[in-house]
């Protein structure tokens, strides 16, 4: 069964991908001007999108752990409520057949853990806004995008960039503050744990853009973490496809989720600032 921390990671990475293709660019240098122009055009079109469906596959590698590799299929439908909030439903189907349902609705993230049942968390307390990064987060993320490149085929553009650990380190400092401003019990210990977790974190994103619509077709995310607590080295690969732009999306929260136990930052696992992981 997929570990809960990795389920959360999947949710946030998928939502982050939606956010990235909708509004995140790389460092603006002359050598990247063509890529930036195409990226900006796509962002403008993506900002008009009201609904989208996503399908894909994921592989999580933890060579130092008892379970060396976990795989899953992903499907998600999302409806934009505001520029920095979505409602949606995602299903994670593991190779064993086990399924995890995640709903984003009315400011909460609801998760049905196959082992423990339903729990919910306020989206802003989870370090995200309905699991979507805000425009401010995206603007900050774009400052740390490196090595932006673009290739062109008959009917699509392909853009690639890297995001290093510096972004996550700065986001962590913004969330936890210095010792004199920390009011959450144990926050200093959590900060030290997060410093250990994000040290050496690396992420690369490659996505394709349809020339005729300037909307994203697919995204390929690769992320690595070195010496993560209790997991060791972690690698994550996600291949995602975007479709059905503008198709109707209705998010119906299951009745059993209404009684979901609410967790808070103090009782749930700590998150990685900047991604909500």
Image: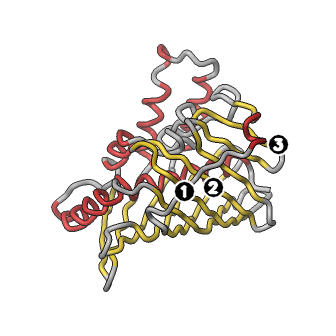
Above-or-below relation of 241 to 200: below
**Of helix, strand and loop, which one carries label 2?**
strand
Direction left: furthest residue:
30
Can residue 226 be seen?
no
For label 3, the residue is: 116
Give the mark nearest the N terminus, 3 or 2: 2
Crowding around mark 1 (Cα neighbors within 10 Å: few <14, some 14 to 19, many 20+) is some
Label disc, if present, on residue 134 of the rendered structure: none
Seen from the viewer's position, the closer of residues 268 and 113 is 113
SS under mark 3: loop
- x 41%, y 44%: residue: 166
N-terminal of the two: label 1 or label 3? 3
Q: In which quarter of the image is residue 257?
A: top right
Label 2 sits on residue = 90
**Residue 253 percent location from the top left of the image:** 67, 45
The residue beneath circle 1 is: 249
Residue 174 position within the rendered picture, expressed as x and y whole percent measured from the top left? 43, 30
The answer to which of 142 and 128 lies nearer the viewer is: 128
């Amino acid at each position: 069964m997929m570990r809960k921390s990795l389920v959360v990671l999947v949710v946030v990475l998928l939502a982050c991908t939606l956010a990235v293709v909708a509004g995140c660019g790389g460092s603006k240098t002359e050598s990247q001007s063509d890529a930036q122009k195409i990226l900006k055009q796509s962002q403008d079109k993506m900002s008009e999108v009201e609904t989208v469906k996503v399908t894909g596959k994921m592989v999580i590698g933890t060579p130092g752990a008892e379970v060396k590799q976990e795989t899953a299929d992903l499907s998600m439908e999302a409806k934009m409520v505001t520029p920095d909030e979505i409602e949606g439903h995602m299903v994670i189907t593991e190779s064993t057949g086990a399924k995890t349902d995640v709903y984003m609705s009315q400011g909460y993230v609801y998760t049905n853990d196959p082992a423990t049942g339903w729990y919910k968390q306020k989206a802003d307390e989870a370090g995200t806004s309905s699991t979507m990064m805000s425009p401010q987060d995206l603007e900050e993320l774009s400052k740390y995008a490196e090595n932006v490149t673009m290739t062109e085929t008959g009917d699509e553009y392909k853009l690639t960039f890297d995001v290093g650990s510096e972004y996550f380190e700065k986001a962590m400092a913004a969330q936890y503050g210095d010792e004199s401003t920390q009011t959450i019990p144990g926050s200093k210990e959590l900060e030290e744990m997060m410093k250990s977790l994000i040290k050496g974190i690396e992420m690369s994103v490659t996505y394709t853009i349809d020339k005729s619509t300037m909307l994203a077709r697919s995204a390929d995310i690769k992320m690595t973490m070195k010496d993560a607590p209790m997991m060791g080295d972690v690698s994550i690969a996600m291949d995602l496809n975007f479709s059905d732009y503008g198709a109707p999306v209705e998010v119906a929260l299951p009745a059993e989720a209404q009684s979901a136990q609410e967790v808070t930052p103090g009782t749930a696992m700590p998150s990685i600032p900047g991604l909500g992981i």
